[in-house]
Amino acid sequence: MTETTVILALVVVTALGFDFTNGFHDTANAMATSIATGALRPKVAVALSGILNLIGAFLSVEVALTVSNAVVRIQNSDGTPKDSLTSDGGTALLLIVLAGLVGGIVWNLLTWLLGLPSSSSHALFGGLIGATIAGLGWAGVNWNGDGSKLDGVIGKVILPALMSPVIAGVVAAVGTWVIYKVTIGVAQRFTDNGFRWGQIGSASLVSLAHGTNDAQKTMGVITLALIATGDWTDTKNIPFWVKAACALAIALGTYLGGWRIIRTLGKGLVEIAPPQGMAAESASAAVILASSHLGFALSTTHVATGSILGSGVGKPGAQVRWRVAGRMVAAWLITLPSAAVVGAIMWYIGNLLGGGLAGAVVVFVLLLAAAGYMYWHSRKTPVDHNNVNDEWDEQPSPRVPAGTAS
Amino acid sequence: MHNLGFALEGAWKVLAASLILGAGLPALFALGIRSLAWGAGGDAEVHETGVTGPRPRPIGNVVGWILFAVVVLGVLLGITFIVASGFGKALSFEHIFPTIVDK
């Protein structure tokens, strides 16, 4: 077992770890509304979402190897890593990928601790961008594309992030408004029971789409690492074990459920009634599917949040907690730069220790320490399937973040 | 800022498609529920107090379930789309009727 193999193993484990955080960070996108309205019991909702994510991940056989190409220049256009990064057996590339993944995971865990639904894709891209800037300089990042298509950090990450929540919000608001107009005068037992099924159906669609979209990214990153070390050469396919491992990781993460984020999205923004829940999830599903059809990359988190806000705007007399929304938007704005800073710091630490095995191990240990600390911190104010639907406390005490108020 | 142009171009298409699917289908679903309630008669719809509600109207049930079927078809189309793009295929709306084609 060579040194490179050990580093590769660390990268694979870290990538699966990221996939896992991606899963529980995003359970809320699909299931927060169904849990909040009581359409599904919390445990049933996360189990359903987990299974659909698993199925979705297996359905995504499309090669996602070039996923990082939109933002960083560490690969050639056919998906193989740049020669300059593999000349030393691939460790240069592995270190960038490892540092980037750590940046993504740390930010995902921190926002989970605060109960903020931030974008996992932004965290991953941010981490990779930061590690690339540290490793290759500013020119290593594909900021603006080459002008021929929507590309680069601006085109693939920032612009969609600005537009997608607005689009989803408009669609959900229109949907909610129409639904309430149409069902005026119908007895509530009729509407609630009917929309309960509509909600479950639309939320399932969001879960499935999430599995196909998000698991792919990790599959691409792992395969890239395998190619860098020469353990895999086929750029048209992904090893089956990679696909299976990623699918399982995201499904397990989803099943675990990011209860803090589910609580914020389901109870914090808007008091959701079944018709709103269905309008919000339908809008999310439609926007996610329509944009991937048109090659418009976006974050499921931004879409889901926009939809839920929209469902609050569209219901006459509903209350929207704009303060909570403001906190979320602030988290979105700093997600990419923050993950980038962590990614860059991790790369410097790894590089300082020689950029080889020692550096990779230290970076990995730092990740474990940070993750352990945040998990321990979360136990002080646990949020789980028992208290996820408790009344939202409008004035959280200053020290405890809103997402964890009991 | 060529990217802004591309993004705006994509954005209005996404908005149009999502309004049809994401707000249109739920609206049909709501109509279906309204239709079922109308069909059920009695207390399913709000009516003057002190009077018994209208008699059941079977046609309402039929219309309601037809509307639900349309919604389910729309959802199936969505699932087909996810699966097809996973296998390197795409849905084409060239002939109005959706067909699965190679990407």
Image (spheres, coloured by chain):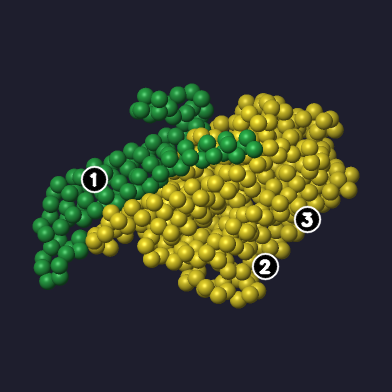
Chain colours: A yellow, B green
* Amino acid type, callout 2: His
* Amino acid type, callout 1: Trp
Q: Nearer the viewer, residue A235 or A269?
A: A269
Q: Secondary structure at mark 3?
A: helix
Q: Nearer the viewer, mark 3 or mark 1?
A: 1
Q: Secondary structure at mark 1?
A: helix
- Residue under label 2, please give it: A377
List x then y, in percent, for residue B30.
Answer: 30, 51
Q: Nearer the viewer, mark 2 or mark 1?
A: 1
Any mark on residue A366, and which? 3
Q: Residue at x 64, y 48 (%)?
A: A122
Q: CA distance from mark 2 to mark 1?
A: 51 Å
* Amino acid type, callout 3: Leu
List x then y, in percent, for residue A205.
Answer: 44, 45
Q: Residue at x 50, y 53 (%)?
A: A306
Which corner quadrant holds the N terminus of chain A?
top right
Side of A73 relative to A190 (left or right): right
Q: CA distance from mark 3 to mark 1?
A: 57 Å
Instruction: Check whether the beta carbons of the residues at disc 3 and disc 1 lie within 8 A of each other.
Output: no
Q: Residue at x 43, y 60 (%)?
A: A312
Instruction: Check whether the beta carbons of the residues at disc 2 and disc 3 lie within 8 A of each other.
Output: no
Side of B41 relative to B32 (left or right): left
Q: Is residue A86 above or below residue A367?
A: above
- Residue under label 1, please give it: B65
Q: Is residue A263 above or below residue A279?
A: below
